[in-house]
Amino acid sequence: MVERLDMQIQYCFSGLTIDDFEITRVDLTKDIHGIPEDKITQYIRIMRQLYLTLGFHHNKKLEENTEDFDPDSSFNAVNDSKKVEFVVYNKGHEVRNKKNSSDEQKEHYKDTMRVEVRCRKKFADKLSEKAYTAQKLVEIYRRRMEVIRDVFDDVFVLNKDSCFISPYWQKKQIKKYVSGKTKLGEKMNDFSKQLAHASRPTMESVIENSEKCQRSVSKLLSKFEDMGISSVTTSDKETPFLQSLNTLFGFSPPSEEEKALYEYIRRKSRGKEVFWYGGDDRG
């Protein structure tokens, strides 16, 4: 691939090679095929609600300056100081909206979630210590999955290992977890309700508007993590379970707790669709 690019550069610019150019941006991508579009929408809505770590924020400039920006089709978190952006979007939706997309492209990217790390020069320079541009590109390519996972871990500290369940099942699991501690259960249910009922709420906005101090909110969120479920619930009542981001993206195998909860809700949810990407590859 690099050799072909080098040949193209020499053809277009006589006397120049790929090593005469500096890397100013590199996009690293991971396509996850076979995810129904309604599930992609749910995951993107959930990610837009999750707590972003210090340094990352929603790309408001993109949202405000893109006329047809769809918040249900794209999640963009940018770190200005590191010069890196983490993006998840509905690739099938994007391809359909392009006028020059072929039928083959539309079919290939149907039900596809794209995970993308966009590296500006400052961030890209740190990904390789090689001297020449061609060598840097090869090394970055070899490390691409590791880099995507590392940036993902920087964006989401909370909830990345936690599955997402419906409000109905959330209440049941909280009741089982608190085991008689009704005040704790009420606090946990109240926090999830605020996230579920506000208009496009984010975890930051709910925390900011909460009467509780940051420490008490952190303790509350840690209880959800101990349970292995997110405080953010699924938005579609017909979908009682969505697996964690970590296992959806393939960054780690599912925990025994996550698999057990999946099986339990699948048996008890009376025919409703319990989504798990990978089908029989769960175990």
Image: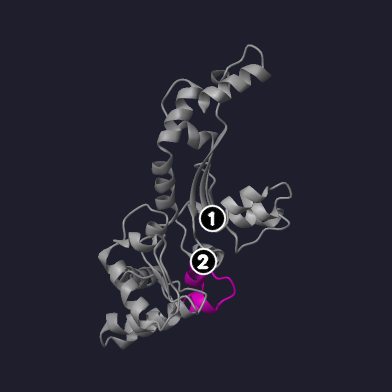
| Magenta run includes residue 275 | no
Q: How far, Cα to Cα, is label 2 from label 1?
A: 10 Å
Q: Quadrant of residue 26?
A: top right
Answer left or right for 208 relative to 182: right
Q: What is the number of callouts on the image?
A: 2
**In this view, 210 is above or below 124:** below
Q: Is residue 69 left or right of residue 179?
A: right
Please identify the quarter of the rendering in which residue 16 is found: top right
Q: Dot 1: few (<14), some (14–19), or many (≥20) neighbours within 10 Å?
A: many
Identify which amino acid the numbered label 2 is placed on: Lys
Question: Would you say residue 200 sits in the magenta stretch?
Answer: yes
Mark 1 is on which residue type?
Thr
Can the viewer see residue 127?
no
Front residue (pair 160, 38): 38
Magenta stretch in the rendered image: 194-210
Q: Position of residue 164 (x, y in %)?
A: 41, 70
Drawn side of residue 94 relative to residue 118, left or right: right
Give residue 126's position: percent from left, percent from top.
44, 33
**Identity of the residue drawn at 31% across and 67% down:** 258
Label 1 belongs to which residue?
A: 112
Q: Secondary structure at mark 2?
A: helix
> Of the numbered discs in the image, which one, if any, rests on residue 39?
2
Residue extending furthest toward the top: 15
Q: How is the image coloured?
A: one colour
Foreground residue among 87 and 99: 99
- Residue at coordinates 45% horizontally, 29% vertically from top-left? 138
- Regarding residue 153, the answer to whether it shows in the image is yes
Percent position (x, y) of residue 103?
A: 66, 50
